[in-house]
């Protein structure tokens, strides 16, 4: 880990916390002292968003959307647009999370539409990619990731200096306790960075983070890897004790 490298600590609270629980956790996190290398972003439920944005209004902790829709406004019951999340104080937006892809049938094409809408705002897209257990077992992991990345980034029009985060989240590691070997996460992160640069331009800012059963006792191993710029954490980020241990581990690795 070099001095200039940023470490992204991304907390995906999924549907674990209601409004009161989210605001209580945000209040506790606001008091934490971070170092300038740490970029902490929490992704609360849409319902808790304004409460959490409010809590972090005088802190360096950013807020992100868990999911967005690609049309700004319209008769789209239950959806919330990227533009609306940006207006509500978000700075980041997850797109293509494996739970969206596999539980709600979202395709690479839909992820691409969402990325375009996200780029029309000032939100930083956090594209989630990853292979299933079957795809890994049949040796297709890299191929699946490449298709996800190509679909998201080929001929993408974006302004200079846009930042992209790609989360390598193997589906078999999400919420299972079966975290990916850090060397394998590093190998995949290297590939993702190469494809990202190829498609978005050599000087583009593409950062890769790892997600999938990250815990206090394994986070340091990922942060040590040169192509892994941080972690995207689900369950362990929704509890103050485990998240603070993860933050502590990151602070000691900068
Ligand atoms: P877990 O950390 O609970 O495995 O979830 C990872 C994830 O999906 C983060 O987006």
Image (cartoon, rainbow, N blue to C red):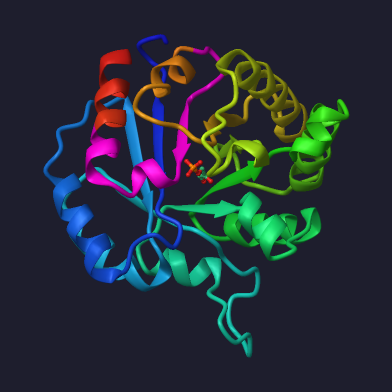
Q: Position of residue 79 (x, y in %)?
A: 57, 77
Which residue appears at 70% of the width and 56% of the height? 101
Whether residue 218 sits left or right of residue 148 in the image: it is left
The answer to whether residue 239 is magenta is: yes
Frontmost residue, 227 versus 224 = 224
The answer to whether residue 92 is magenta is: no
Whether residue 27 sits left or right of residue 174 in the image: it is left
**Most extreme residue toward the top, as rendered?**
2
Frontmost residue, 220 versus 158 = 220
Which residue appears at 58% of the width and 82% of the height? 73
Quarter occupied by residue 212: top right
Quarter occupied by residue 71: bottom right
Which residue appears at 51% of the width and 69% of the height? 83
In the picture shown, does residue 95 fall above or below 36? below
Q: Position of residue 109 (x, y in %)?
A: 80, 58
On the question of residue 57 being in view, the answer is: no
Whether residue 190 sits left or right of residue 83 in the image: it is right
Frontmost residue, 245 versus 109 = 245
The quarter of the picture where the N terminus appears is: top left
Tell me which segment is drawn in magenta: 225-244
In the picture shown, does residue 46 fall above or below 165? below
The quarter of the picture where the C terminus appears is: top left
């Amino acid at each position: 880990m070099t001095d200039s490298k940023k470490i992204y600590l991304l907390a995906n609270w999924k549907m674990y916390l209601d409004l009161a629980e989210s605001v209580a956790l945000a209040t506790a996190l606001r008091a934490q002292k971070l170092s300038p290398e740490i970029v902490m972003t929490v992704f609360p439920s849409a319902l808790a968003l304004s409460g959490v944005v409010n809590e972090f209004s005088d802190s360096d902790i950013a807020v992100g959307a868990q999911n967005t829709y690609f049309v700004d406004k319209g008769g789209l019951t239950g959806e919330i647009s990227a533009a609306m999340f940006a207006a509500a104080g978000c700075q980041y937006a997850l797109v293509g999370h494996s739970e969206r892809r596999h539980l709600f049938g979202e395709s690479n094409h839909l992820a691409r539409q969402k990325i375009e809408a996200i780029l029309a705002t000032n939100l930083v897209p956090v594209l989630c990619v990853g292979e299933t257990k079957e795809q890994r077992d049949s040796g297709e992991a890299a191929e699946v990731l490449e298709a996800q990345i190509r679909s998201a980034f080929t001929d993408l029009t974006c302004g200079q200096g846009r930042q992209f985060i790609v989360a390598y989240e193997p589906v078999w590691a999400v919420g299972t306790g079966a975290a990916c070997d850090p060397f394998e996460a590093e190998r995949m992160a290297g590939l993702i960075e190469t494809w990202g640069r190829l498609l978005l331009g050599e000087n583009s800012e593409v950062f890769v983070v790892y997600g999938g059963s990250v815990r206090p006792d394994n986070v340091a191993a990922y942060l040590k890897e040169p192509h892994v710029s941080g972690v995207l954490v689900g369950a362990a980020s929704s509890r103050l004790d485990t998240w603070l241990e993860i933050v502590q581990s990151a602070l000691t690795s900068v």
